[in-house]
Image (spheres, rainbow, N blue to C red):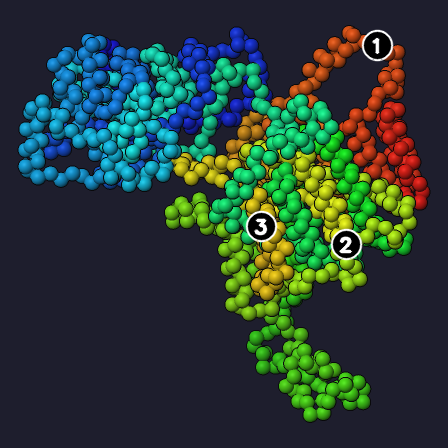
Amino acid sequence: MKNSSQSNVTENKHLLLVPTRGYNYDKIDKVNQINLASAPLKFRAVSPAAERLRHILGDDDSTPTPTIFTEMDTLQHEGGELEWKESARWVKFEEKVEEGGERWSKPHVSTLTLHSLFELRTCLQTGSILLDLEGYSLPQIVDDIVDRQIADGLIPADLKEKISFVLLRKHRHQTKKPIHRSLADIGKSSAAASNPAQSRSMNDISDTPSSDQLKNKFMKKIPRDAEASNVLIGEVDFLDKPFVSFVRLAQATTLGGLTEVPVPTRFLFILLGPHGKTKSYNEIGRAIATLMVDDLFSDVAYKARDREDLIAGVDEFLDEVIVLPPGEWDPKIRIEPPKKVPSAEMRKSVLNLNELGQMNGSAGGAGGGEDEEMIGGGLWLDIKRKLPWYCSDIYDGFHIQSISAVLFIYLGCITNAITFGGLLGDATDNYQGVMESFLGTALAGTVFCLFGGQPLIILSSTGPILIFEKLLYEFSKNNDIDYMELRLWIGLHSCLQCFLLVVSDASYIIKYMTRFTEEGFSSLISFIFISDAIKKMVGAFKYYPINRGFKPDYITAYKCECIAPDQGESSVLCMFNLTDLDWSQLSKKECVKYGGTLVGNSCKYVPDLALMSFILFFGTYSMTVSLKKFKFSRYFPTKLRKLISDFSIFMSIMAFVGLDMLMGLDTPKLIVPTEFKPTRANRGWIVMPFGKNPWWWYLASFVPALLVTILIFMDQQISAVIVNRKENKLKKGCGYHLDLFWVGVLMAVCSFMGLPWYVAATVISIAHIDSLKMESESSAPGEQPQFLGVREQRLTGILVFVLTGLSIFLAPILQFIPMPVLYGVFLYMGVASLSGIQFWERIKLYLMPAKHQPDFSFLRHVPLRRVHLFTLVQIICLAVLWILKSTFLAIIFPVMILGLMVVRKLLDVMFSQHDLAWLDDILPDKDKKKKEDDKKKMKEKKTPEPESDEEVRGNETPGLETVFLVVVYLIVCQSICCVAPDTNTVCFSSLSHSVAEKALYNTYYSLCPPALQSLSC
């Protein structure tokens, strides 16, 4: 090599560099990222190497670069024979062959000496570079490499045979055992080594993969489209200066036994040199191998046009590496791979001309289009978006993971149906009960999963609907109105109002539901699930009290006898012929039945069913949590661990159902209807719309229907926003308008059949998504399985609701499931839905000292006191919602969710946009404000200014959002007026006094004569 620094290698043992793979570029300031992308090119500081790479990567043909598997082989002398022995390999992280052991090291982040990178740069500057070489076999490729070296004057022609002989030696991989040769074989090897002309006949390089390669299980860790990069490092005695060559083949070619696995080779790096530089050569080989698995450098290697492009790639890598100071780091320590491998997209976006000036993107499904301008454009877009995926929505569900999801969600749905059915029966005098709840759940859920826009959403009854049903039944009973007929007309009006919201594209209000609103709503629903599960468990201790007074030592004194009643006092003796009855042999139930009296201090004794119920409750929850985490365990193969994790809930339920059966205690069991008939005997399955109420009730029901519509709209859309959040990586798009359309249709159908109304259930929907999450099956050694998204399909939801409808026929089996087990499932649903919520993570920060707080990205960019203030605002809002939920005002609870959107708007005053970008989402109007201002200025230039602001407000036409928000506000005010009638004027005066809003108010109030004001409450 011509450069003197190449021959005088300095071995720096302390100064280490961590490659860019260990640095998290995703944590760069999002606000600065936006500013960087929109900044003019001339103001952006870019190094010369990055400038060159920008033009290389700017010609991107959108073809993804294959994953590179890199193998480094070193030249070894075994029994006087030369062979190449595998010493390290890379997919994403480095694995070394342990010294003295026949095994691979644990995957770790490569730590390189700074000098090795400079030496590699020199090698690329002075060695031969062959790009897009046509190669079909290793001997032909070796000939072309050596011929290029001779043509460039780097080696003399008389070394061709010796170099070819060395490069074509046998490759021994770590999967093979050491080769034991006979004396005859060693003699042949020595003879062959003395005669280089025989080298071609002695090489072990075949054109086809060997059986050891095909059987290698390591192929499971490598993506299917991967290509290989082979690094050959060795010392020979016939060279006086290094022999360096970098080769990129025009097409990836399988070179037989060159690589440990049957992966076609695309790149070759060869470094042969004189003796005495073993460590230096190995470090250079590790450096090029580490660069080849770097996402950015691999792109450069595929698209490089000459030597300078490769050197620019090395320079860019040097610009990004992190130096660990000597004396503060032990080079022998192997850095564990990070749990989440940072993406190189940030580095690429800075270099890619195609991405300059682009923003982060718009929310899926909320983008605009020409079809939006027409009536019902949003619904039409949803249909066009979902229709091409309909077939895949069916066959994508045929997976073993779907079975565990169906069993999990099915048990959650029937428990919910029984709970709400029982409460509805109590609230409506059995006009709606458990039977109606089962049938309605099955019907509404099946139709929605078949035709809805987001089939991952699970429909269920909700608390506000239950409270509305209770108030409506009491109103009907007190005013001699037929409850079912009035409810039918409310459902029909609500259906029409949902259609109006769909046609007017009112679902676009979800653009203003940021993380602040989503997390407040989902946290509240999660806490409700947790508290309800605990309340039901605590109730078992009251129903089955613990026998605190029982003393085992005095068991001989405990007895219970049945005393016969007096013959003159009891009328039971007249009904039965009990003269010859032995009262001392009767059971407790028989004694009470025949009028006897139980006497004794053990008569009230019951087994500790409360304690057993608690064991079933907490055992189901804790076992589910443990088995769900089992896929991260070190025990058993990966597929078995994943199978156990997927079926964790089913296994937990079966385990504790078996324990309950083994103990034989009379714990409370699941009660399912066994006959297909209405709960109330005097009602049928169809509700007639006319004949029982005065005609004007058919019109007046429009007012309470408006409140129901708001309940349905807010519950449905917020749940849909949480399901469709970008963290779930859904690929088939959302369907807010289509979802609301089918919810409206089902409102009408359920009203005609006298079934409960259904809307999206947040916690069960989140549980449905969690049970269908997909992870990468082939992950590189040391790399955690990557979250790929959710198995988007309709099959699991359809099967869940079909099974719910068939539960009547499954009653003999379901009656063995203890209710405490299902309460444990409810507790798990509530706790699991809190995971991944930033609000919950920020609450836990209050209890952590600063030095023990996790390294969250928002803590790097937002002061801790501002984080705590933002969290405190959310806690206060959550507390207010919890109080509202616990009082009679729970009926307007979904309307109060709009209050969260108002509070979020006010936070723009308290916090900077930089802080909100990390703690929440930026409101869409912030991005469009400048454009709107420019448009207004253009209009002002074209039109003369009005005389007064009142003139403008008097002539304006109310927009859709104004109409919707004003109507919501008036409904809230009218509801409050039931409690404090004098507040009506205050409510109205707080509105803006535009002519449009006054007209809206007058229109609403004209529909509310005094006789109907109580109904609107």
Residue 446 % position (x, y): 63, 48
Which mark is drawn over residue 799?
3
Residue 1001 % position (x, y): 88, 32
Counting every numbered tag in the picture gives 3
Give SS at disc 2.
loop
Depth-wise, is mark 3 or mark 1 nearer the camera?
3
Residue 604: tell me if it is visible: yes
Is 96 or 995 nearer to us in this picture?
995
Q: Which of marks 2 and 1 is nearer the N terminus?
A: 2
Location of the C terminus (image quadrant): top right
Report which residue position mark 2 lands on: 686
Is 668 or 375 nearer to us in this picture?
375
Crowd rating for badge 2 (residues with CA inside 10 Å; few <14, some 14–19, many 20+):
few
Query: How far, Cα to Cα, is label 3 from label 1?
Result: 63 Å
Identified at 88% across, 41% down, the residue is: 977
Give SS at disc 3.
helix
**Relative side of 707 to 404, left or right:** right
Residue 617 in the image: above or below residue 518: below
Q: Which amino acid does label 3 sit on?
A: Leu
Depth-wise, is mark 2 or mark 1 nearer the camera?
2
Report which residue position mark 1 lands on: 945
Q: What residue type is labelled 1?
A: Glu
Identified at 89% across, 28% down, the residue is: 998
Crowd rating for badge 1 (residues with CA inside 10 Å; few <14, some 14–19, many 20+):
few
